[in-house]
Image: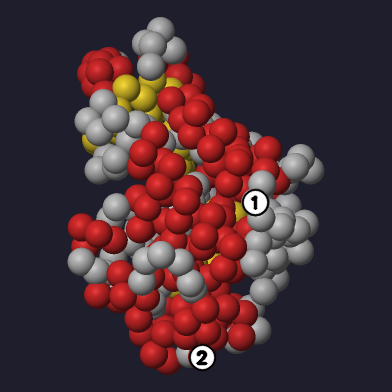
Amino acid sequence: MKIGMIFAGQGSQYVGMAHEFYDAFPEAKDVFDQVNIDIDVKKVCFEGPEDVLNETSYAQPCILTTSLAIAKVIEAHGIRPDYVAGLSLGEYSALAYAGAFDIQDAISIVRRRGQIMSEALLAGTTSMAAVLAMDALKIQEVIEPIDGVTIANYNCPGQIVITGTKEAVELASEKLKEVGAKRVIPLKVSGAFHSPLLEEASHQLKDELEKYEIHQPNIPVIYNVSGKEEDRDLIEILTQQIKSSVYFYQSIQYMIENGVEAFVEIGPGKALSAFVKKTDRSVPVYSVDSIEGLNQMLGALKNG
């Protein structure tokens, strides 16, 4: 059976994530205990406080550590994916799992990535919003004449995220509701991620990435910037990713078209599982952010 492993993005974090994995499995403990950056990732993951964990520069290394800890436990139980992908930040988890980065390097990179993203945009001047129950082409048609707003995420059919300046996103939200969007929900984020407003941030990220040794992934990676495999330089792809649309449901479709018969969501929360179900209900997806979820996934895939 071909398996696609998908890694959680920012916004999925919660206090206590992966704590039970740390206590129960040496593979998870090893990942957390080897982390060595300027914050106590283990303490923030397990104890919070929530407002600190939710800060972009803390959330990103904490989610990546949690995801890799869980992935290593799954691997120890004999489950290996045929493809990996992740939502935005989750792409770094996918790449680290696939051997493109050393785990410590990956955590250091996303710590800096989070800082760059936090510092890139003046607080309160930019925003993002999720548009529900409207076709992506229709959304693009409505927002195209509005300066300062673009599509950030193609999460799943019926859920598209727009991003840009606060005024542009508010105007676009009103226009979209006028022409039939079921709901447009402002997101609780610190800025307009995956927008051209992060052009300068992308250059800073490129400078950071060039400090590290990057390897060819040993598992096929499906990338956010295109929703498919890429043969371009990885630094080029990740520099583009921070300021470009995330083609997530296209990534899911690509893996299904290439034979994936089940997905395993790795990391905190179950958002990606919902996106998969809305993209193609015929393909099973298992969310592993608890030991209960791990056992359900193992029971299904090992007996399937």
**Residue 215 picture quarter:** bottom right
Frontmost residue, 134 versus 264: 264
Q: Where does label 1 land, which residue?
A: 211
Q: Quadrant of the N terminus?
A: bottom right
| Circle 2 residues within 10 Å: few <14, some 14–19, many ≥20 | some
Mark seen at residue 187: none
Q: How many marks?
A: 2
Callout 1: SS: loop
Image location (x, y in percent) of residue 80: 67, 74
- Residue 3, image x, y percentages: 65, 66
Residue at 57% x, 68% y: name it.
Answer: 104
Visible in this render: residue 299? no
User: Where the C terminus falls, by quadrant?
Assistant: bottom right
Identify the residue at image location x=44%, y=70%: 66
Q: Position of residue 166 (x, y in %)?
A: 26, 24
Q: Secondary structure at mark 2?
A: helix
User: What residue would you read off at disc 2?
Assistant: 26
Q: CA distance from mark 1 to mark 2?
A: 30 Å
Say left or right for 35 vs 78: left
Nearer the observer: mark 1 or 2; the answer is: 1
Mark 1 residue crowding within 10 angstroms, few (<14) / some (14–19) / many (20+): few
For the residues bearing labels 1 and 2, Cβ distance under 8 angstroms:
no
Question: Against 178, is 97 above or below?
Answer: below
Residue sitting farthest toward the top:
145
Amino acid type assigned to the residue bearing label 1 in the image: Lys
Whether residue 290 is visible here, answered yes or no, is yes
Res 241 → quadrant: top right
Relative vertical location of residue 269 with respect to residue 277 in this rendering, above or below? below
